[in-house]
Amino acid sequence: MKKNINWLLNSPLTAPDSTLLVRFLVGSIFFWEGILKFVYANQGVGRFTKLGLPFPEFTADLIAGFEIVGGLFIILGLFSRIISLAFAVEMLVAIWMTKIVLFSGVSPLPLPQVPPKIGGWAFLHEVRTDYALLLLSIFIAWEGPGKKSLDYKWKHKNKWSKTVS
């Protein structure tokens, strides 16, 4: 258990500097999607109600708040592994609840406006953003936030302060 907690709390910090671009992409998408859930009811409470989620008002606000804060944390590179793994789980749930049903056309949400509306091609077309965010979140968890992150600055500040004390 201690090993798992240590793995979760100590992201690798050796990722290339270009990881900052991936963090910015993932973090900013989650950030603005979280804001949209508050601003437009059809993206938050309305969508969660149609999906049959329990306590849709609370759930929508909780997810929206997490996306806003988590998105900022990913951009800053703070608690990167924990947040990115949570985002990966969120994407798996989103794919399961909103995209898999496109195979049979029984989605509680409106079907896509243009063909393909149901079937494999509809699924592949509609899942593209969720799939990209899933894999990019896993990438951040795997590679870590890199040196251009608060995780890196925090880890090295703590090491420096321990050697000075």
Image (spheres, grey):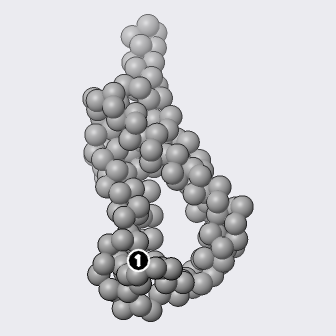
Residue 88 locus on image (x, y percent): 39, 58
Q: What is the total number of numbered labels drawn onto the structure image?
A: 1
Q: Is residue 48 above or below residue 107?
A: above
Give 106 or 69, whichever is nearer the viewer: 106
Residue 62 locus on image (x, y percent): 62, 63
| 86 with respect to 47 (left or right) | left
Q: Residue beneath label 1, please? A: 99
Residue 129 locus on image (x, y percent): 41, 61
| 132 with respect to 98 (left or right) | left
Residue drawn at x 33%, y 31% as measured from the top left: 18
Residue 137 can be seen in this image? yes
Residue drawn at x 60%, y 57% as measured from the top left: 34
Picture quadrant of residue 124: bottom left
Picture quadrant of residue 23: top left
Residue drawn at x 52%, y 41% as measured from the top left: 73
Give 83 or 137, whichever is nearer the viewer: 137
Give 113 or 59, whichever is nearer the viewer: 113
| 120 with respect to 137 (left or right) | left
| 67 with respect to 145 (left or right) | right
Q: Is residue 114 above or below residue 104?
A: above
Residue 61 locus on image (x, y percent): 66, 64
Task: Name the element at disc 1.
Answer: helix
Q: Is residue 63 above or below residue 28?
A: below
Residue drawn at x 50%, y 34% as measured from the top left: 76
Q: Counting other residues with Cα less than 10 Å from the Cα at mark 1, is it few (<14), some (14-19), or many (20 or more)?
A: many
Q: Residue furthest front?
A: 114
Residue 70 can be seen in this image? no
Q: Residue furthest top?
A: 164
Identified by mark 1, the residue type is Lys
